[in-house]
Amino acid sequence: MGIEALWHPWRTLRDHHADVDVTCRHRLPDQIMGLQRGARIWLCRTLTQAERRCTLTHELVHRERGPVPTDPVAAAREERIVDEIAARRLIALTALVNGIRWSRHPRELAEHLWVDEPTLNTRMATLDSIEVPELEHELDGEWLWIP
């Protein structure tokens, strides 16, 4: 898979959200990698390149889906949905298969896929009923994932 097939959150930002300003200059509170208000997205300045890519994708999915519900249970559900959508955009099944052929170590595989480990774990945890047999077929049944 060529670089052209990769999801590019920065390109998506430019092409579809040109009104949004992104800043990486501030340190955000602990456990907060990114947030948005109005037409601004903040990405914590301590993030790695892969973390910035994943966090920006997450925030763009939030923009597409609309406000997070105020109810804590609904908000948690929305976060899980956004995490899954972001992980699927960032990690195509073909790239995942090729990556697993190269390494099954989560840190190495995440680096190879240019994502952070939580995004990789989300992608693996949310494989659908069509993707699992495809992975098994492509990898001759020899894949084991225990995050």
Image: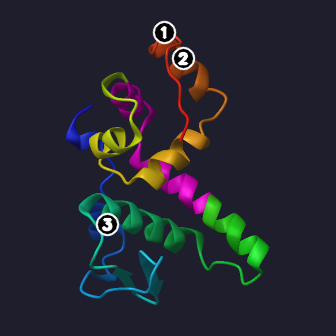
x, y percentage for residue 23?
27, 83
Which structural element holds mark 3?
Answer: helix
Task: Identify which amino acid the numbered label 3 is placed on.
Answer: Arg
- Disc 2/disc 1 C-alpha distance (Å): 6 Å
Part of the protein shown in magenta: 81-100
Query: What residue did someone put label 2 on?
Result: 136
Q: Main secondary structure of the magenta part?
A: helix
Can you name the residue that lies furthest to the top here?
Answer: 140
Question: Which color scheme does this rendered protein use?
Answer: rainbow
Question: Which residue is drawn at the image coordinates 41% and 41% (left, top)?
Answer: 106
Task: Relative to 138, say whether 103 is above or below.
Answer: below
Task: Identify which amino acid the numbered label 2 is placed on.
Answer: Glu
In the shown orientation, is residue 71 left or right of residue 106? right
Task: Identify which amino acid the numbered label 1 is placed on.
Answer: Asp
Q: Residues within 10 Å of mark 3 (few under 14, many from 20)?
A: many
The reply to whether discs 2 and 1 touch (Cβ–Cβ < 8 Å) is: yes
x, y percentage for residue 82?
57, 62
Q: Earlier in the sequence, mark 2 or mark 3?
A: 3
In the shown orientation, is residue 141 left or right of residue 92? right
Query: What residue did someone put label 3 on?
Result: 52
Query: What residue did someone put label 1 on?
Result: 140
Which structural element holds mark 2?
Answer: helix
Task: Relative to 35, say whether 137 is above or below.
Answer: above
Asked whether 18 or 21 is in front, the reply is: 21
Q: Earlier in the sequence, mark 3 or mark 1?
A: 3
x, y percentage for residue 109?
35, 38
